[in-house]
Image (cartoon, rainbow, N blue to C red):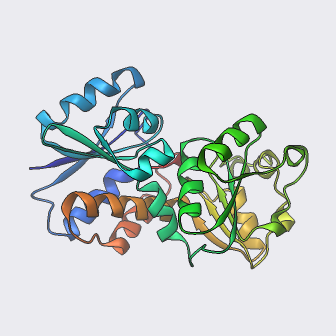
Amino acid sequence: MPRLAVIGHPVGHSLSPQMHTAALREMGLAGEWSYEALDVPPDEFRRVIAGLPEGGFAGANVTIPHKRAAFEIADDPSEAVRAIGAANTLSFGGGRVAAENTDAPGLIASLPESPKGHRALVLGAGGAARAAAWALADVGAAVWIWNRTHRKTEQLASELRVRPVEPEATHRSLQLGRYEVIVNATSVGLGGSRGEGADLKALHLDADSFTERHVVVDLVYGASETELVRAARAGGAKVVDGREVLVRQGAASLRMWTKREPPIETMRQAIRQSDGREEASHGA
């Protein structure tokens, strides 16, 4: 029986096991394939990955904090993985490790319309921001990167050949009227849902700036909507939360491993049924 897993540290919050198990059942593969969670500290990552093929694993999703390490250990990284510098999907075969980044196509598939020709703002400078910026630019969007540390903004913009938001925006609210697509790829997420008011301030966003012309993606997901999602909805923006991106990237991984089309709605339902049982998360 081929085994699959999500690997992270910590990983107990991940919705991937519920989502993938439901999908495998719907695909008629539950008796042939399995999916589990493996909590692996960073200093154990290489050793654990090396032993997975012998343990019957055909592949693994990789989440925080291992996405960079997954790229570094890969024998066969895809073009996207090389460009992004991070991998979230590994496949094992023939004694080699193939690495792919399904975060990028997962983001694009989750959008209500193609971002080609639109202006996009990506908030953050970590692995999720790298995947988002690369994916948007790859399909023809004009992309700007913003991070609270401008040095990181400039470095990422240079590496991915996108545009940095000028440093003066670090000290005032970002002018959202310049963009049609806004992606939060930072760890800022659930402060507002706990009664705190720090989320939008930390992101330098003005709650009154969202309009119906915006598409807002918040890669953070949890038991409650983030302040960013609530503000975007209130302004009439089209909203994509982290769950939908998780479903889409997970479907891309399953498609790669099983060579079959995954049941998207079944995966969505599995996540909805898990509401209220998970902590805030960012990725798989």
The number of discs equals: 0
Q: Residue at x 79, y 69 (%)?
A: 210
Q: Would residue 198 be seen by someone viewing this image from the given angle?
A: yes
Determine whether, in the image, residue 1 is placed left or right of residue 40.
left
Query: From the viewer's perspective, is residue 58 above or below residue 263?
Result: above
Q: Position of residue 45 (x, y in %)?
A: 34, 27
- The picture places residue 248, in percent across and down from the top left corner, at 42, 65
Instruction: Say which residue appears at 41% left-offset and 32% top-offset.
Output: 69
Residue located farthest toward the top when viewing the structure as drawn: 43
Q: Is any part of residue 273 visible from this angle?
A: no
Q: Nearer the viewer, residue 32 or 114?
A: 114
In this picture, residue 129 sits left or right of residue 87: right
Please give the name of the residue rendered at 68% of the width and 73% of the height, measured from the top-left corner.
118
Q: Is residue 204 left or right of residue 254?
A: right
Closer to the camera, 29 or 216? 216
- Location of residue 127 by image quarter: top right
Residue 46 image offset from top left, x and y in percent: 31, 26
**Where 171 falls versus 120 (above or below)?**
above
- Residue 182 x %, y %: 69, 63
- Image point (46%, 55%), residue name: 103
Q: In front here: 54 or 207?
A: 54
